[in-house]
Amino acid sequence: MRRRCRSPSAPRPLLPRASSGWAGEGAKAMALWALLSPGVLVRTGHTVLTWGITLVLFLHDTELRQWEEQGELFLPLTFLLLVLGSLLLYLAVSLMDPGYVTAQPQSQEEPKEEQTAMVPQAIPLRRCRYCLVLEGLPNLGPDCGLQSSQNALGEPALSLDSPLCPQQPLRARHCRDCRRCVRRYDHHCPWMENCVGERNHPLFVAYLALQLVVLLWGLYLAWSGLRFFQPWGLWLRSTGLLFATFLLLSFFSLVVSLLLASHLYLVASNTTTWEFISSHRIAYLRQRTSNPFDRGLTRNLAHFFCGWPSGPWETLWAEEEEEGSSQAV
């Protein structure tokens, strides 16, 4: 019998090509979603608004333009450098890690006596019910203690008895916007689309200070270009954009001034926005009449900006507890 061979013109299955097409469409959708994410939109809007206001100040008859026309470039360049510096600080604060709490496998060794003595036993460290931080953990097997459950937000959750469940240090809090626990949590800034925590709080204060300088200088420059004359229709067409810029800069200057003043007060007293507003809801502050982390203005500023003296917050809490008990005796 003769074997029948398939004709070379017979069509071949197109399943691999179709699957690759679906993968390509999925990659395009994910890339589009990444471009339209709130963080990208907020940062792009801030950048466009910053350079747009700067362009308005250069195009109108302000002192900035007069300096440029007279060849005095020192002040215009200084202004541009300040604007660029404030923008870079904004991007640094909004993109950097604010101090996320990461899960680490617990060692089987018993803690040393001096280590356990540093942590107050009255306030045990909590385990966060919301976080599922598994980055960098090697080969999670079936015996890792992972439970297939969900939390109140509909996210996968770990059992509280699992050694992989992130342990909240003192002063840390879970941010539902970032879906992570943040060390020394201050607040979630919607304008930054990022949390302000232990790592980026000093840069946040520096950004507010530099931004306030830029806003006040821009406010002065916008006022220098305003010329009030009649008829009002002609004035509005020629100076309306500059006047709107002046009002916008006035509003931003007021907001940034209040933010900077409040954060300087919080830094000077070594507290956070969350602790200041919700002290009655926080376990380690609820029964205290004073701030247990306040060590005086100089030491508070040195610890905030320079990280000195270093050490866990549990140690400071324990020292304050010992001082309070000794004074009571």
Image (cartoon, helix red, strand yellow):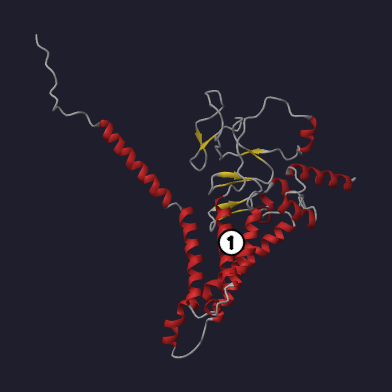
Is residue 290 in view from this perspective?
no
Classify mark 1: residues with Cα within 10 Å, few (<14), some (14-19) or many (20+): some
Residue 58 position, x and y percent, is 50, 74
Furthest residue in direction right, as rendered? 329
Is residue 178 in view from this perspective?
yes
Furthest residue in direction bottom, as rendered? 230
272 sits left or right of 291 in the view: left
Q: Looking at this view, is 10 or 301 the one in front?
A: 10
How many numbered dots are placed on residues in this image? 1
Residue occupying image coordinates x 47% and y 68%? 52
Residue 244 position, x and y percent, is 49, 76
Residue occupying image coordinates x 50% and y 33%? 149
Quarter of image, res 204: bottom right
Q: Looking at this view, is 14 or 167 the one in front?
A: 14
Kindly state the secondary structure of the residue where label 1 is placed.
helix
Residue 5 position, x and y percent, is 13, 18
34 sits left or right of 172 in the view: left
Above or below 80: residue 278 = above
Above or below 109: residue 30 = below
32 sits left or right of 84 in the view: left
* Residue position for label 1: 85
Q: Looking at this view, is 227 or 291 the one in front?
A: 227
Residue 45 position, x and y percent, is 47, 61
Quarter of image, res 111: top right
Q: Looking at this view, is 72 or 55 the one in front?
A: 72
Quarter of the rendering occupied by the N terminus: top left
Q: Amino acid at mark 1?
A: Gly
